Image (cartoon, rainbow, N blue to C red):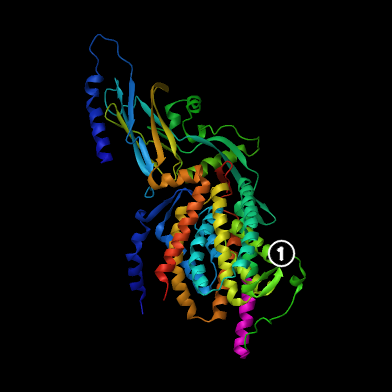
Amino acid sequence: VVRASEFWFLVSDFWFLASPMFQVYLPIAEISVNLVVMLGLGAAVGFLSGMFGVGGGFLLTPFLMFSGIPASIAVATGANQIVATSVSGALAQWRRDNIDFRMGTVLIAGGVVGALIGVFLLKALREAGQAGLIISLTYVALLGIVGALMLAESIRAIRRARAGKPASGRKPGQHNWIHGLPLKLRFPRSRLYISAIPPLVIGWVVGLLTAFLGVGGGFIMVPAMIYLLRMPTNIVIGTSIFQIIFVTAVVTVLHASFTHTLDVVLALILATGGVIGGQFGVRAGQRLRGEQLRALLAMMVFAVAIRLLLDLLLKPSELFSIAPLAAGA
Amino acid sequence: MRAALSLAALLAIASAPAWAAEPAAGQPTPSEELQSDLSTREISIQANFTGIEILIYGSIDFSQTKAPDTGAYDVVIVIRAPSHPIVARRKERVAGIWVNGAGKVYLSVPGFYAALSTRPFRAITSDETLKKLGIGLNNLDLGKVSKDNPDQERFRSAVIRLKEKQNLFQQHDGAVAFIGRSLFRAAVALPVNVPIGRYTADIYLFRDGQVISKNQSTLEVNKAGFERVIYLLAFNHPFIYGLLAVLVAVLAGLAGWFAFRRE
């Protein structure tokens, strides 16, 4: 047991981490940040994403915004960071043969189109000075919905577990409206013969979100693949990570080229923290129960949404802002 | 090292006016002349850059002050970075949410501005002269404003307030100190977020409200080393920069996978 006084000794021992020695100047964001804080942020988000098995971009971008990084730089840099973390994840999935490459390619095709639209939308909003606002609003809506769904789902699961009933899975062989669509393709790895339109649309939405919010989009893609496409669950994660690598890579290049908001130094710091934190997260996650984990994640997602919403609703202490012309918020 | 050099320079100047200030009898009194320099002429912004203090020092040749601190002279120093257009916005409440309103463009706002003086500006010279020379934040010309607006003053003061908060606009009356009869010095802190470019330092010597001598020095602020490479790449070859960023991320991911893989 660590007593309070000992704890403060510990804290004071690490005070030096706040010294200017650990300040890193970010060449594109043009601000100076604390290396230890940013590594810690990357590690914390990596830990959470490893623990919960999610990409973590939807937590990283808001956290970057909370720590003073301009919204559009947080988005582009977040996308670049996800490339790094998803490469590790995809390799592990690929070795277990959990990737449907054909499905992944269709998802990527949709994703690239979405990414193009997202990047140009963000560029236009930036020039109008509204990027920060729209990014925050979209996050509030998205995190609010995702948090609510996850919370409801995990509460149901906890109740079921208490009642002693087994978790209900999907019923195989069921057909839905998706099977009526044209342009059918065979996906042998997923054992599916379905229209290419739904995966294209799913990919498109995810690409748009990646470019616009700096998220991988796994939290949308995974449920969509399970419930809409009815892909086998073991293939879903690997295929979604495969799509995420390519779409986040494309978004990184597009943002670098058209919005100039990519800060590679920040991305590398976050990725370093993220890759390390992710490993510990995976180990921690294995010791906790699934439903409780999801309830915990849902609450965290809600907390981020509420903080973003409060920032929009409360009167800011400074009403004015300045930005270089033709660059924006 | 740098401080030691500038101290040596100060001492060198300090010893000079002994003969310079006292012309031979019978000759007409030469008028005062300003000599000045900066402690640094080039600043390189690298990863470890956390801001820097520069020293502006100089002397008045042919100083006619009989004793120190008689206050016959005033020195005003104005340091500026290149100007760029900026847009200022004010948040307005729309449907309960604070939203940026329409922007007002200021066409030439210095990226950095500092005005330093021996005494309050208005005690040194007339408002007219201050305005003409752009001395003091109130007299700073921010360029043409995009359109007429009733809140002109509030926007202007907001721009100045925000720049002051970032330490990119500074004014310190009393920051220039005389040492003895003719030697003066002032220090200004450039913050971590200083923009790059060629800075100018205008040094004005005032007597009885008139500029009797002036001098200009320049200061280059550049990104250097790794920072410079990244900055140039990002803005001149953005596509390659993006590809490299992806490559670095892929390598980082691979490294992580190899480091932590459990066989």
B225 or B206, nearer to the observer: B225
Q: Position of residue B60 (x, y in %)?
A: 31, 24
At horizontal 35% and vertical 62% (from top left) the residue drawn is A15
Residue B245 visible: yes
At horizontal 64% and vertical 63% (from top left) the residue drawn is A106
Q: Quadrant of the N terminus of chain B?
A: top left
Residue B30 left/right relative to A160: left
> Would you say residue A164 sits in the magenta stretch?
yes
At horizontal 26% and vertical 25% (from top left) the residue drawn is B67
| Residue B174 falls in image quadrant | top left
Q: Residue furthest bottom?
A: A164
Q: According to the image, label 1 marks what residue?
A: A197
Give the magenta range.
A147-165
Classify B219 as above or below A114.
above
Q: Position of residue A77 (x, y in %)?
A: 51, 56
At horizontal 40% and vertical 30% (from top left) the residue drawn is B76
